[in-house]
Image (cartoon, grey):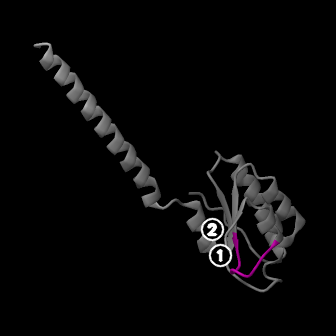
Amino acid sequence: MVIAPTAVQGEDAQLQIVKALELLNRMEKPDVIIVARGGGSLEDLWAFNVESVVRAIADSGVPVITGIGHETDFTLADFAADLRAPTPTGAAVLATPDIQDLQNPIAEYQSRFFNSSGSEYIQTKDKSTESGL
């Protein structure tokens, strides 16, 4: 995990957000970029409505998930992102798989492997017994 801290409101915010997105895209490609900040007034969230930030998100070669504000807050950055979460926590949840979702297919494949390997072993053993080996 790489964190690119930036201002998220105020005069410097839009430039810092754009530079952070550019930096993350130049690094060894991360799986996803989360652009997030907690709630606030429309003015507090305004950096995420600025064209340069919206374009940087849209131009990202890495998928971007936004989690800006609270559930009822929408910014232009949300529409440029690959996926919008209702909150910063929601963005983290969307970016990370549930361990059960990973374990269930593995258990299924493991079961299929052992079942098929075992039956082939039994069939081979039966044939060798029949032939007197």
Indicate the quadrant where residue 103 lies: bottom left
Q: Is 30 positioned to the left or the right of 127 in the image?
A: right
Q: Is residue 72 above or below residue 27?
A: below
Residue 82 point in image, percent of width and height: 73, 58
- Say whether residue 12 is visible: no
Q: Which mark is residue 87?
A: 1
Q: Which mark is residue 91?
A: 2
Indicate the quadrant where residue 1 lies: bottom right
Q: Is residue 28 above or below residue 17?
A: above
Question: Please, what is the dominant secondary structure of the magenta stretch?
Answer: loop
Amino acid carrying label 2: it is Ala
Residue drawn at (85%, 59%) of the image: 55
- Marks 2 & 1, CB-CB < 8 Å contact: yes
Q: Is residue 117 above or below residue 34?
A: above
Report the magenta residues as a range.
Answer: 67-75
Q: Which mark is residue 21?
A: none
Q: In this orientation, which residue lies closer to the viewer: 37 or 96?
A: 96
Q: In this orientation, which residue lies closer to the viewer: 90 or 105?
A: 105
Residue drawn at (23%, 26%) of the image: 123
- Say whether residue 91 is visible: yes
Residue drawn at (69%, 75%) of the image: 37
Residue 18 point in image, percent of width and height: 80, 61
The residue furthest right is 51
Label 2 residue SS:
helix
Q: Is 56 positioned to the left or the right of 85 in the image?
A: right
